[in-house]
Image (cartoon, grey):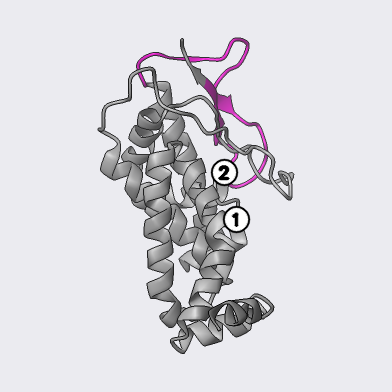
Amino acid sequence: MGRTRRSTLRRLDEATLIERARSGDGWAADELLRRYEPQVRSVCRRICRSHHDAEDAAQDTLASINVGLRSFDGRSALGTWVNRIATNRALDELRRRHRRPEPVGGDEHVVSDQHRSDGPSPDEPEPAVIGGETRSELATALAALPDLLAEAVALRDVADLDYATIAEELGVPVGTVRSRISRGRAQLADHLRATPGWNRSPGTDVQASGRSGADHHTPETRMHPTP
């Protein structure tokens, strides 16, 4: 019976599943979690850069989604809501564990996804490109950011949400989102640049991207740790 019900639920559209989940249908909630679990794990891996931390953050995210589905108001798309929860749980995990000693031989790395689905627009500055940091270095830098800035940067550069979607989800104007992202990227770059043992890649520099727009002073960082 359970297998038949799961098979039926998998054919339902998302809106129907959300309505059922809000009414207390645990099977519908489980199906939504199944559909969004890969997205949750991807966001958590890209922020945490550590399998162990990402797994903890993903489990916290899925639990929060399961509890929150009954009160989900549909103000934003479900995927946007899921991304925000995953982003904040991953940031929480970094802040809880950023002082944990590094394993012998260094920590694992997760390569940044630098290929946006929509590509950069002419009025958008280049995002901070951070591809070589270890878990503790990234955690220290992100943990040092004010919550509002860390959330905005992660939603844009990790969850890959556009400015309008972030603004709608956070309930603030687009200009505020741009300002938070600009300030967050700049502060993140400053923290990483000040990390002992870091050098900029040969032939590169940390400077403003030179693009026009509200946050044209955002630095473009391309940094890698020294061996």
Residue that carries the numbered disc 2 in the rendered image:
215
Which residue is pictured at 61% across the width and 85% down the height?
A: 16
Residue 157 x %, y %: 56, 45
Residue that carries the numbered disc 1 in the rendered image:
161
Q: Main secondary structure of the magenta part?
A: loop
Which residue is pictured at 51% across the width and 56% down the height?
A: 40
Residue 177 x %, y %: 51, 55
| Image-based side of 19 in relation to 55, left or right | right
Residue 24 x %, y %: 43, 86
Reply above or below: 131 against 119.
above
> Looking at this view, is 55 or 112 the one in front?
55
Q: Earlier in the sequence, mark 2 or mark 1?
A: 1
Q: Give the residue type that dot 2 points to.
A: Asp
Q: Give the residue type that dot 1 points to.
A: Leu
Reply above or below: 227 against 109.
above
Mark 2 vs mark 1, foreground winner is 1
Reply above or below: 64 against 178.
below
> Looking at this view, is 40 or 145 the one in front?
40
Q: Give the range drawn in magenta.
A: 195-223
Residue 120 part of the magenta segment: no
Q: Can I make out residue 108 in this image?
A: yes
Which residue is pictured at 73% across the width and 46% down the height?
A: 121
> Looking at this view, is 71 or 27 the one in front?
27
